[in-house]
Amino acid sequence: MARLTLEYFALLRDEAGCPREEIDTAAPSLAALYEELTRRHGFTLPAARLRVAVNAAFARWDHRPAEGDHVVFIPPVSGG
């Protein structure tokens, strides 16, 4: 189990109902974490359309989250 700080932007923030939250998770990867959060918050964007960062560095979806990590899910940007 790891305690993580999660941050959401744009559509994900709207769907989660908050810009940031702390959770405890046993997810073995960022992909599994996003699946867990999709079930909890009803996210409509597939992981394939997002970027993910851990502790201010882009990460791969197979990265294993660790205690104290700050995870940011970044949806596609639009507009100009």
Image (cartoon, rainbow, N blue to C red):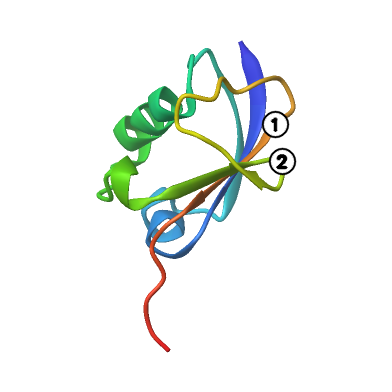
Q: Quadrant of residue 19?
A: bottom right
Residue 17 location (% of width, % of height): 45, 54
Q: Quadrant of residue 21?
A: top right
Q: What residue sits 67% from the left and 20% below the top?
A: 66
Question: Judging from the image, what secondary structure is the residue with disc 1 in?
Answer: loop
Q: What residue sits 28% from the left and 50% below the top?
A: 45
For the N terminus, the image quarter is: top right
Asked whether 80 or 12 is in front, the reply is: 80
27 with respect to 50 (left or right): right
Residue 69 numbered tag: 1
Q: What residue sits 56% from the left and 20% below the top?
A: 64
Lower sequence index among marks 2 and 1: 2
59 with respect to 51 (left or right): right
| Residue topped by disc 2 | 55
8 with respect to 3 (left or right): left
Question: Dot 2 surroundings within 10 Å: few (below 14), some, or many (20 or more)?
Answer: few
CA separation in Å, label 2 and label 1 = 6 Å
For the C terminus, the image quarter is: bottom left
